[in-house]
Image (cartoon, coloured by chain):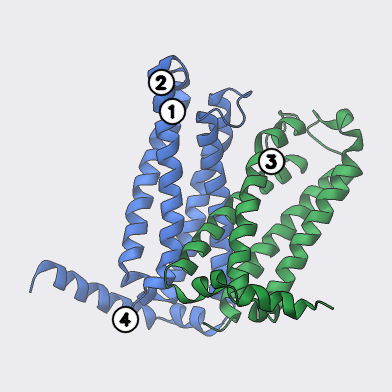
Chain colours: A blue, B green
């Protein structure tokens, strides 16, 4: 057997085990729990996505341009991290409720890979906007870098939201 | 006389509605754009609401907060309405028969009324309190109400997906 087949079998067994736990049964049985978790999940995404986009639009000098870049970043970017925790908890419970929907789904792993990249990228951006905000505003190079970073950030967060919705359409069985 | 049923039939029978129904990619694509737009609408409104409630960004005048955020809200709202209408068109009769869909529309209307009341009544003397951290009760109420309404809008939106039969 190849490595991929072995991993596939282990993940399949794990999904089966997870789906048989008492917690999974509780989530499946009460019909309102999954839509309620998804609602909290989307509300949290709304807060996170808006916070990232408003800083990106400031980097583009489209909105909030009368506020120093450093202040906009300090106001909105730290909000992201507690919200990520809420997303991991609600997302984790959704996986426990329907393990096969995500764990046996390539789109889910794509979403997680994109999320890992977005987290690292946003940490770096937050650090740089607080340590050296002048870099992003002085000179043509800095302003170009700001637009590039902002565009990349918007695209990555959008892809994560797209992938999230796509999980519903690519599940097996 | 033109009935609502005829108007709905016109949209539902259009080739655009047909494409949204029949094409496997089109519906999820429109739905994803809808989620994206809703997230920006709700996220941005909540930021403004938190300022009205005196919870966040209280050092910045309310007018500064709204000027720097609401253009994004309106842009995203247009996208949400357009994408939402495309999905509605594809299955208009079924959506109108869904209680959560009707509730969602009513809640959005309520949010609109709340906004108009705020704009034309509570914000008439905005210059007086614009820079204050703690705002008058009517302003805080508008912010709190707006937050609750939009949370309910998102909940109804998600519940539509669970109460509509596939197809």
| Residue beneath disc 3 | B70
Image coordinates for residue A137, horizontal then vertical, percent? 47, 19
Residue extending farthest top: A139
User: Would you call the spot at circle 1 few (<14 residues within 10 Å), some (14-19), or many (20 or more)?
Assistant: many
Residue B42 visible in the picture: no
- Residue that label 2 marks: A142
SS for callout 3: helix
> In the image, is residue A63 above or below residue A42?
above
Q: Are marks 2 and 3 in contact (CB under 8 Å)?
A: no
Instruction: Name the quarter where the N terminus of chain A is drawn.
Output: bottom left
**In which image quadrant can residue A4 be found?**
bottom left
Q: Are marks 3 and 4 in contact (CB under 8 Å)?
A: no
Q: Which residue is mark 4?
A: A16
Chain ID of residue with mark 1: A
Q: Which mark is residue A146?
A: 1
B162 sits left or right of B138 in the view: left
> Helix, strand or loop at disc 1?
helix
Query: What whole-number distance in Å separates the C-alpha atoms at marks 1 and 2?
Result: 6 Å
Circle 3 chain: B
How far is mark 1 from mark 3, CA to CA? 23 Å
Quadrant in which residue A118 is drawn? top left
Q: Name the foreground residue: B1 vs A164.
A: B1
């Amino acid at each position: 057997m190849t490595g991929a087949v072995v991993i596939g079998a282990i993940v399949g067994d794990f999904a089966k085990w997870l789906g048989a736990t008492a917690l999974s049964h509780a989530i499946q049985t009460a019909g309102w729990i999954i839509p309620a978790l998804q609602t909290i999940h989307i509300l949290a995404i709304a807060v996170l996505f808006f916070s990232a986009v408003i800083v990106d639009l400031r980097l583009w000098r489209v909105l909030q341009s009368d506020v120093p870049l450093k202040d906009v970043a300090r106001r909105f970017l730290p909000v992201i991290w507690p919200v990520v925790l809420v997303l991991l908890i609600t997302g984790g419970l959704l996986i426990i409720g329907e393990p096969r929907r995500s764990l046996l789904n390539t789109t889910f792993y794509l979403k997680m890979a994109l999320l890992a990249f977005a987290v690292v990228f946003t940490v770096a951006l937050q650090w740089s906007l607080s340590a050296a905000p002048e870099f992003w505003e002085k000179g043509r190079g800095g302003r170009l870098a700001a637009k590039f970073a902002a565009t990349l950030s918007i695209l990555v967060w959008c892809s994560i939201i797209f992938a999230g919705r796509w999980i519903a359409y690519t599940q097996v069985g | 006389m033109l009935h609502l049923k005829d108007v709905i039939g016109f949209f539902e029978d259009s080739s655009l509605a047909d494409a949204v129904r029949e094409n496997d990619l089109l519906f999820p694509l429109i739905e994803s754009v809808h989620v994206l737009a809703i997230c920006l609408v709700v996220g941005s409104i909540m930021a403004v609401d938190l300022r009205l409630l005196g919870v966040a960004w209280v050092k910045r005048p309310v007018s500064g907060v709204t000027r720097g955020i609401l253009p994004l809200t309106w842009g995203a709202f247009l996208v949400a309405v357009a994408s939402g209408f495309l999905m509605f068109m594809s299955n208009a009769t079924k959506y109108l028969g869904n209680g959560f869909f009707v509730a969602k529309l009513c809640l959005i209307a309520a949010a609109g009324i709340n906004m108009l009341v705020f704009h034309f009544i509570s914000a008439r003397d905005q210059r007086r309190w614009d820079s204050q951290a703690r705002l008058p009760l009517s302003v805080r109420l508008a912010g709190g109400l707006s937050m609750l309404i939009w949370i309910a809008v998102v909940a109804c939106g998600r519940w539509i997906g669970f109460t509509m039969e596939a197809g």
